Amino acid sequence: MGQETVGFSRFGEYLCSAILKRQILKNPIFFFLLFLSVSLIIQAKGDGPEIKSVELEGVSSKNESPYDPTEDIMHHISDSYGWHLFDWKGHSISVPLPVILFTEKGLVTFMSSSFHHDHEGKHVVETQGYRFVNYHEKIYYASSSPNNHGAFVSVSKESHAIENNQPIDISITKNVASLLLSVILILWLFLSMARFYKNQDGHSSPKGVASFMEPIVVFVRDEIAKNNIGRHYNRFVPLLLTFFFFIWINNVLGLIPIFPGGANLTGNIAVTMVLALVVMVVTNLNGNKNYWSHIFWMPGVPVAVKPLLAVVEFIGIFTKPFSLMIRLFANITAGHIIVLSLISLIFIFETVLVSPVSVLLTLFISVLEILVTALQAYIFTLLTALYIGAALQEEHH
Amino acid sequence: MDIVTPGFGLLFWTTITFMFLLFVLSKFAWKPILNAVKEREEAIDGALEAAEKAKNDLMSLKSSNEDLLKEARAEREQILREAREIKENTISEAKELAKEEASKVLDSAREQINNEKLAAMTEVKNQAAKLAIDMAEKVLRSELKDPASQEKMVNRAMDEVKLN
Amino acid sequence: MTGSIAALGAGLAVIGIGIGIGQIGGHAMDAIARNPEATSKISSNMIITAALVEGAGLFGIVVSLLK
C-alpha cells in the first residue's frame, strides 16, 4: 500500500494520548506533594515515638525485626495454589483452586483450600492414602514428622535443597486460572469482533470492540507482519496476532491489582518459555534452504571461518527464542517488583506518611507499565516476525 | 532461584491453552476478521478507483460537451454572419437596383421632359413665328397702305443691304 | 537479596544496558532530527536494536538471579 509505514510510536500515542494529555508530570503540585511527603517522612523518622503510633497494624506485630519486602514480593510474583484476594481481620480470604496431582497410583485431586492458606509445609493434607504438604507453593510428599521449623519436609543441610519427592503437578494454580480467564476474555473479545464482521451487511465501518481492535489488528498485519516477513506474510498473521493479543491482554491483566487480574502470568518463565518454543518451532519448520545454508555453511566467508560461524549460528537458533523468553519474563516481573517495592516503602519506613510518595510513584510506574504492556507485546511479536522473515528470506545477495 | 525455573504444571497448561487459543482464534476470529478487513480495503480501493474513473469520465464528458458547445456556438456565429451577409447583400443589391431603376426612370423622365420641352419649344416657336408673321403681315399691311411709305421701306431696305 | 553479589551483578548488567540503550536512543533522536521523514523507520529499527541490547543485558540479570 502507499501508506507511509507507521512505527510503534503512533501505536503508543494511540494508547497513551488520553493519559499523557493530562500531563500529570508537568503539574507542579505533583512535585510539591512529593517533596512534602519526603520531608514529612524525614521528620517522622527523627521525631520517633509519638508519630510511630500511626504505624500499620500488620507491621507492628513483627516490630522486632525490620520489614523485609523480598519474601512478600517473591510470593506475589510467584505462582500459588490458591488465589489470595485480601486479608480480613487477620484471616486470608482466597479463591480455592483445584489441585491436580499425578502420583504413582494415579490421579489425586483436592481443593487448595485443604491447605488452609499454609505454604510453610506445616499443614499436611491426607487424601487417598497420600500425605501432601505445600512448602513455598510447591507440593511435596510430606515427611512423617516435622523438622525443627515445624515443616513436614526435610531440608538438606549443605545445599538447602528439599529432599522430599514431588508428584507430577498439573494443578489449576493462580497463574493457570488467570490464563484460562484471559483465554475466555480473548475469545469473547475476538469472537464477538468476528461476529460483527460476519453480520455486517456491505462494508460498514467497525463499531464497538471492532472499532478499537481493528486498527491494532491492521497494525500487526501491516507494520509487523508485512514489513518484516515479506512476500508470504499472510500465513503468519494469525500466529502473530495471537501472540500480540495474548501477551498484551495478559500483561494488562497482570497490572490490575484486584481479583481477576494481578497474576504475574506473562512474568512467569514457564509461560514465556512456551511462547518462545512456539516461535522456535515455527521459525525452524519454515526455514528454507537459504536459511539453513546461512546457519551451517555461511556463504561469502572464507572456508576456515565457516565452521566457527556454523557453531555461532547454531547456538543462535536457541538464543533467539531464549532471549524472547527472558525479555518478556524479566520486563513484566521487573514491573511487578517495582510496583510492589514502592508499596513496600510504607512498611519499610513504618509510617503512613510515606504513602503519598509511594502511591504517586506507583501511579507513575503503573502508567509506564501500561506502555510497557503494549511495548513488550509489540517487541515480542516484532522479533518473532523478524525471525520468521529471516527464515523465509530468499537468496538474493 | 525459583522464579527462573519453569514449573511443569504451568508449562503443560500454557501449551494446551495457547494451542487451543491459536487454533480457535485462527479459525473463528482472525480468518473472518482479516478477510472482512481485506475485503473492505479492496472495496474502498475499488470505490476510490471507480470514483477516480468516474471523475475522469466526467471530465472528458465535460470537455467533449464543451467542444460540442464551442462548435455549436461557432456554427451559430457562422450562420448569423452568413445571414447578416446575405441581408446586407440583399439590401445593397436592392438599393443598387432601386437606384438604377430610379435613375432609369429619372433619365426617361428627363428625356421625356426634354422631348416635351423641345416639342413645346417648337410649338411655341412655331406659334411665335406664326404670330410674328401674322403680326408682321398686319403691320406690313397697315404700313404699306400708301405708296410713299412703301417707297421709303424699300429704300431703307436697300440701304441696309448696302451696308451689309 | 540482602547484600548478595548477585544483586551487584544485576546492577552491573543494567549499567551496560543503560549505556547501550541510551546510545541507541540518542543517536536515533539525532537521526530523526536530521531526517524527520524517516521517523517511523528509524524508531522501529531503534526498538529492534534496543531489544537486542536489552536481551544481552537480561542474560546478565538472569544469571545473577540464578545465584
Image (tube, rainbow, N blue to C red):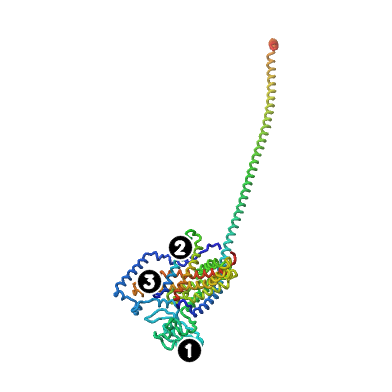
Amino acid at circle 3: Ser
- Which label belongs to residue C26? 2
Residue C41, numbered label: none
- At 68% from the left edge and 17% from the top edge, which residue is drawn? B136
Q: Kindly report the distance in space between the C-alpha atoms of the residues bearing marks 1 and 3.
A: 48 Å
Q: Does dot 1 land on a helix, a strand or a loop?
A: loop
Q: Residue at x 31, y 75 (%)?
A: A52
Cα separation, mark 2 vs mark 3, equals: 31 Å
Distance between the alpha carbons at the discs numbered 2 and 1: 63 Å
Percent across and percent down for residue A24 are: 40, 66
Q: Looking at the rendering, in which quadrant would you find the N terminus of chain C?
A: bottom left
Residue under label 1, please give it: A128
Residue C34: x and y in percent read: 48, 58
Residue A199 in sight from this viewpoint: no
Q: Are marks 2 and 1 on the same chain?
A: no
**Disc 2 packing (10 Å; few <14; some 14–19; many ≥20):** few
Q: Chain of mark 3?
A: A
Q: Are marks 2 and 3 in contact (CB under 8 Å)?
A: no
Q: Please give the residue where the numbered disc 3 appears in the rendered image.
A: A358
Position of residue B163 measured from the top left corner of the image (x, y, whole percent): 69, 11
